[in-house]
Image (cartoon, rainbow, N blue to C red):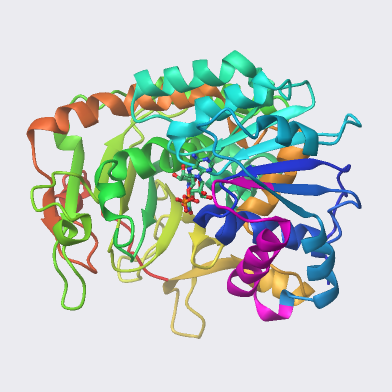
């Protein structure tokens, strides 16, 4: 079954770095799926621009191989593949040289259609490309520019990048991707909170005990070791993905589901985050050698590395809704499982009327699961079935999106599908504004600064991180939820 789609108008999409990993693994498959679902209009053009020497046919071959590799067999239809590949064009362009930009201009349509420039290249090229587009008169009002993390490595560099982009593009034309915001579950968090009356009255310090946000990966940094070693988990995951998830969990209801209304509320959360001045509230770790896996040092090719592959921290939000409610965040590589969720832990009932012998009642937990199996569960205390008296037990209301979609014959779309089409439609709701990015850096910068003189704690491959991370919650009389599928 084809998902309900609103077709977009014909567009030109230029992908700088179209031969790279992100383009092949995510963008090309995402665009193929949008065509298969009927969202790509006739006349849409996708122009790959990269340094490699090849022509449009060569690029179509590369894209076709990417489809074989990253789209499941049952979703590949020869007729759609043919139509999709016919939309692709290629321009050999070294963005560091002045040549080629006029050729790019010559390839663009001049019928006033949306023109998107997706910078799927290293961030050091962002400013140069924005300038190149502007120099040949392509930064018109129909143009939008798309950039993705890392958006700076601290507040100063993020500000410099924002300034560079602002020289050629208005804020309304700049799409800063955090692909977590394109995930179905994350959008569902907003639907759950603001399209139902059930949770919002309880969504505050009076009823919520604490919030845990976990993004655990089972893989290490192999393959991108020296690159990652220059970044670390705080910059790679906390500054963007974890803080964005925290914002959507904690923000006030926006007046409308519109870009600035939503982003204003997220910004207020970022600016209300309690500063991390007590370093005992932050734990950083680095994975050890496992029985079959290399140590962080070996993966990073740096025996003296002090870069963290794990962060756990406790923060709070200084406003009227959240006084005294801890937000615990953790993320790490080479952990027990690939597992991400936001868990909202409600408070215990104020008084239990049930006999002490019965198990519970236990406080409710609303878990919004991002991976591996996107969905939402609500743990409830119910009566244990049978005639054995009033015994209590825990059960889960479980909504797996994959299962729900499978029942209707639909496929779970990838985050990039939604985000790329939002760029074409000109909808910035799920993209970060420049001031949000800066506020997030302003909060995490002092922590990274404080780490300069300390070393991360070692943790076992396949574990839940360093012991101190467990202590972070134990000392508050709480514990982390299990990293489990
Ligand atoms: P990559 O190294 O695989 O690809 C880089 C691309 O840039 C290639 O197409 C290359 O030809 C092109 N390029 C390099 N120098 C060029 C030049 N001078 N002129 C024109 N083109 C040039 O990198 P990637 O993994 O695709 O990542 C691209 C960007 O996306 C990076 O900023 C990365 O941090 C970000 N990103 C990547 C992923 C991912 O899953 N790979 C995820 C999130 C963000």
Viewer-nearest residue: 237 or 280: 237
Which picture quadrant has residue 405? bottom right
The answer to whether residue 333 is left or right of residue 13 is left
The answer to whether residue 47 is left or right of residue 244 is right
How far across and how far down the image is residue 64, in percent? 68, 69
Viewer-nearest residue: 279 or 456: 456
| Region rendered in magenta | 48-74
Q: Is residue 358 above or below residue 239?
A: below
| Residue at 54% in and 39% down | 94
Which picture quadrant has residue 218? bottom left
| Residue at 58% in and 16% down | 166
Residue 403 visible in the displayed image: yes
How far across and how far down the image is residue 221, in percent? 29, 58
How far across and how far down the image is residue 243, in percent? 43, 37
Residue 413 visible in the displayed image: no
Number of marks drawn: 0
| Residue at 49% in and 67% down | 372
């Amino acid at each position: 079954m084809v998902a309900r789609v609103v077709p977009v108008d014909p567009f030109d999409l230029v992908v700088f770095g179209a031969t790279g990993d992100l383009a092949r693994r995510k963008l090309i498959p995402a665009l193929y799926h949008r065509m298969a679902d009927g969202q790509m209009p006739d006349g849409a053009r996708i122009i790959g621009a990269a340094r490699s020497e090849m022509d449009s046919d060569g690029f179509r071959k590369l894209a076709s191989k990417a489809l074989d590799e990253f789209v499941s067999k049952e979703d590949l239809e020869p007729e759609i593949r043919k139509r999709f590949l016919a939309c692709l064009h290629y321009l050999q362009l070294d963005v560091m040289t002045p040549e080629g930009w006029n050729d790019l201009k010559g390839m663009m349509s001049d019928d006033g259609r949306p023109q998107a420039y997706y910078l799927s290249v290293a961030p050091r090229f962002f400013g140069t490309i924005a300038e190149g587009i502007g120099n040949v008169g392509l930064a018109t009002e129909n143009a939008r520019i798309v950039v993705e993390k890392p958006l700076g490595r601290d507040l100063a560099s993020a500000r410099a990048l924002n300034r560079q982009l602002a020289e050629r593009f208005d804020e309304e034309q700049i799409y800063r991707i955090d692909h977590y915001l394109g995930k179905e579950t994350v959008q569902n968090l907003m639907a759950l909170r603001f399209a139902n009356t059930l949770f919002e009255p309880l969504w505050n310090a009076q009823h919520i005990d604490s919030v845990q946000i976990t993004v655990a990966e089972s893989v290490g940094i192999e393959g991108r070791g020296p690159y990652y070693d220059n970044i670390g988990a705080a910059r790679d995951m906390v500054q963007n993905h974890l803080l964005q998830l925290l914002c959507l969990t904690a923000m006030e209801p926006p007046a409308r589901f519109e870009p600035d209304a939503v982003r204003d509320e997220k910004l207020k959360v970022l600016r209300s985050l309690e500063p991390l001045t007590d370093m005992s509230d932050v734990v950083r770790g680095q994975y050890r050698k496992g029985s079959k896996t290399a140590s962080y040092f070996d993966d990073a090719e740096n025996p003296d590395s002090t870069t963290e592959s794990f962060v756990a921290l406790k923060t709070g939000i200084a406003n009227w809704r959240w006084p005294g409610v801890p937000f615990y965040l953790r993320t790490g590589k080479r952990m027990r499982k690939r597992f991400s969720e936001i868990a909202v832990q409600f408070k215990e009932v104020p008084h239990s009327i049930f006999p002490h012998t019965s198990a519970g009642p236990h406080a409710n937990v609303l878990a919004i699961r991002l991976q591996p199996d996107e969905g939402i569960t609500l743990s409830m205390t119910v009566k244990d079935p049978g005639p054995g008296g009033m015994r209590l037990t825990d059960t889960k209301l479980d909504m797996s999106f994959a299962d729900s979609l499978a029942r209707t014959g639909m496929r779970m779309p990838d985050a990039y599908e939604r985000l790329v089409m939002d760029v074409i439609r000109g909808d910035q709701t799920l993209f970060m504004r420049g001031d949000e990015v800066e506020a997030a850096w302003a909060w995490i910068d002092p922590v990274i600064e404080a780490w300069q003189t300390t070393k991360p704690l070692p943790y076992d491959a396949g574990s839940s991180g360093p012991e101190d991370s467990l202590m972070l919650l134990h000392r508050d009389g709480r514990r982390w939820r299990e990293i489990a599928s």
